[in-house]
């Protein structure tokens, strides 16, 4: 898993290397200080040689300043390297998600993807910084301090032979127990983020139904569940510290006892004992740093696993990158014995044996009850999903033969959820065509019956929209989404119940504008109101994932009982 993130170091390898080198230099100068102190006490003070004390003291000051300089450099370079590494990881994740099909996205919740792009990447960033700093500093300090301690008193250094294996065993056990607990903790982060996303998206509904207290209770429960799992996981980290401190103080007591006996026996000087204790502290501190580093790596390992899941996820829809891939010649559409299932289960089909021919330039209406798979049917045209069996052809070629960019550039969809982005109205419209002129924006808005309400706004087409277009009505958002799709000048346009929030008069004007502006464009209209599709060249009636009937309005009125009953009931509603 760690190897799969190595490419993310690209561009930040040099700061990473120099950060580690700076840490090594900082540590060496730091380890040198107790040795110099020993010389001052055992040589300078013992012999009352003031000039020697001053010379060695100045060396200590210089060593301290060098250690400080390299410490600052190491910290700065490590920050640059780790933040750059995190930026690259986030970029790889985001690009991977952009290549996902709808089926891939369905396998991961949106909340989970957000957690992986934020909390998990932050954990990995921290782990990377610890790797190039703490996991360099700690071993260097432990080795250098051990060498110096052995040089001062080899027999007294045997204290470490007992302490280090015990500490290593304790750390290993704690890491083994902690890893699965941190994995569970991150799953609870996903669950809490899912609640946050859902509640904030539906805040208007919550307020309309006065459900604030109920939703606060739900969130408190999710937050408390996360807290319990956090405590359960972090108990392992908390337990490591007192174990390490106990071992550290036990070693210091042992050194003081045995070292004191050696001083009394005349085999060790006082300055040597003080320096030895400093090296004991450095060795044990380095062990503590290693334990903390490995604890952080345990947390990050769970995060890395979740990040690698996204990077390794293979898009269900593979792009055709062949040089001779066809281009979309026209807007003809052909469904041939199409079966489809969201969970790829042939025994649980959402669409079953769909056969439908649509000529280029035709206007086709699709109606059917809720859950009849109308939206599912049209999502197969731009390859948002792939068929389970059978084939969907556009312009005479199977959609799987096209490059995805080419296919989707020629198919415009106005979805049920009218999603707009933060920015101006003009910026939102130009999603349909980046280089569209102001005149083109106005022309598309007029066809979509949006120009009047846009022009009435104080800033017109430069009016800033809130997130998801919250400062617009449902009908206004629908009309902007239609205008955005029109700017693509597609060969096929799909309107998925996209005029449900506008009045019938506006709906009629939009359809009239389509007839004038979309001549030669295949238009597919999914609607609940038969009045929205009754003028179509053909109307498809869907029922439980199957095509129940196909025909013109007059033909279906004469031959399809369900269609006729729905039409009459809607006409009564109008009357």
Image (spheres, grey):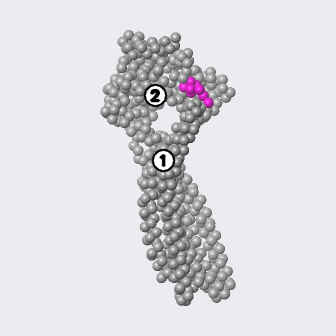
Q: How many marks?
A: 2
> As displayed, is residue 534 above or below residue 114?
above
Task: Give the residue displayed 41% in from the left and 17% down from the top.
Answer: 539
> As displayed, is residue 330 above or below residue 346?
above
Query: Where residue 411 is drawn, which disc sits there?
Result: 2
Mark 2 → mark 1, Cα distance in angstroms: 39 Å
The residue lying toward the viewer, choosing from 574 and 144, is 574
Task: Give the residue displayed 53% in from the left and 86% down from the top.
Answer: 262
Dot 1 alpha-carbon crowd within 10 angstroms: few under 14, some 14 to 19, many 20 or more: many
Task: Give x and y (percent) for residue 271.
Answer: 59, 82
Task: Give x and y (percent) for residue 179.
Answer: 44, 56
Task: Give x and y (percent) for residue 518.
Answer: 49, 20
Task: Give the residue displayed 57% in from the left and 62% down from the top.
Answer: 74
Magenta segment main secondary structure = helix
Determine the image quadrant of residue 351.
top left
Res 401 visible: no
Query: Where residue 188 is drawn, which disc sits there?
Result: 1
- Secondary structure beneath dot 2 equals strand
Res 497 visible: yes
- Secondary structure beneath dot 1 equals helix
Task: Give the residue displayed 42% in from the left and 40% down from the top.
Answer: 107
Segment colored magenta: 471-478
């Amino acid at each position: 898993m760690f190897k799969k993130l190595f490419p993310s170091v690209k561009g930040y390898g040099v700061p990473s290397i120099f950060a580690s080198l700076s840490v090594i230099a900082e540590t060496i100068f730091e380890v040198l200080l107790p040795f110099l102190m020993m010389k001052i006490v055992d040589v300078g003070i013992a012999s009352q040689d003031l000039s020697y004390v001053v010379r060695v003291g100045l060396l200590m000051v210089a060593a301290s300043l060098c250690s400080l300089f390299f410490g600052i450099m190491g910290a700065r370079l490590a920050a640059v390297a780790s933040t750059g590494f995190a930026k690259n990881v986030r970029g790889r994740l985001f690009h991977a998600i952009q290549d996902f099909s709808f089926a891939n996205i369905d396998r991961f919740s949106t909340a989970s993807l957000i957690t992986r792009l934020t909390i998990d990447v932050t954990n990995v960033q921290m782990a990377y910084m610890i790797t190039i700093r703490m996991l360099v500093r700690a071993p260097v300090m432990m080795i250098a301090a051990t060498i110096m301690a052995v040089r001062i008193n080899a027999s007294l250094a045997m204290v470490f032979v007992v302490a280090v294996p015990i500490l290593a065993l304790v750390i290993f056990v704690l890491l083994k127990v902690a890893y699965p607990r941190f994995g569970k903790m991150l799953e609870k982060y996903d669950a809490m983020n899912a609640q946050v996303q859902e509640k904030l998206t539906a805040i208007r509904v919550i307020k309309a139904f006065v459900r604030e207290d109920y939703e606060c209770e739900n969130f408190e429960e999710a937050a408390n569940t996360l807290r319990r799992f956090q405590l359960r996981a972090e108990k392992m980290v908390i337990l490591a510290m007192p174990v390490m401190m106990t071992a550290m103080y036990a070693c210091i007591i042992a050194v003081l006892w045995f070292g004191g006996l050696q001083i009394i026996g005349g085999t060790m000087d006082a300055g040597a004992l003080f320096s030895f204790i400093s090296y004991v502290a450095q060795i044990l501190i380095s062990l503590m740093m290693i334990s903390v580093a490995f604890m952080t790596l345990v947390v990050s390992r769970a995060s890395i696993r979740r990040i690698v899941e996204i990077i390794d996820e293979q898009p269900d829809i593979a792009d055709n990158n062949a040089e001779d891939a066809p281009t979309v010649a026209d807007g003809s559409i052909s469904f041939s014995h199409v079966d489809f299932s969201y969970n790829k289960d042939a025994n649980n089909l959402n669409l079953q044996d769909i056969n439908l021919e649509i000529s280029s330039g035709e206007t086709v209406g699709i109606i059917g009850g809720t859950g009849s798979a109308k939206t599912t049917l049209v999502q197969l045209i731009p390859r948002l999903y792939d068929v389970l069996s059978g084939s969907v052809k556009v312009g005479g070629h199977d959609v799987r033969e096209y490059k995805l960019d080419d296919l989707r550039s020629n198919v415009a969809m106005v979805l049920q959820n009218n999603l707009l982005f933060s920015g101006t109205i003009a910026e939102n419209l130009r999603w349909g065509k980046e280089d569209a002129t102001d005149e083109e924006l106005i022309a598309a808005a007029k066809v979509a019956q949006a120009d009047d309400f846009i022009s009435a706004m104080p800033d017109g087409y430069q009016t800033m929209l809130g997130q998801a277009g919250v400062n617009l009505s449902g009908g206004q958002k629908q009309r902007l989404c239609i205008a955005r799709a029109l700017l693509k000048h597609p060969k096929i346009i799909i309107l998925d119940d996209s005029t449900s929030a506008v009045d019938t008069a506006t709906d009629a004007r939009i359809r009239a504008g389509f007839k004038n502006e979309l001549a030669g464009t295949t238009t597919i209209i999914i609607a609940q109101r038969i009045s929205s599709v009754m003028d179509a060249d053909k109307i498809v009636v869907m029922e439980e994932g199957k095509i129940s009937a196909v025909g013109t309005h007059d033909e279906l009125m004469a031959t399809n009982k369900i269609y006729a009953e729905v039409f009459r009931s809607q006409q009564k509603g109008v009357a």
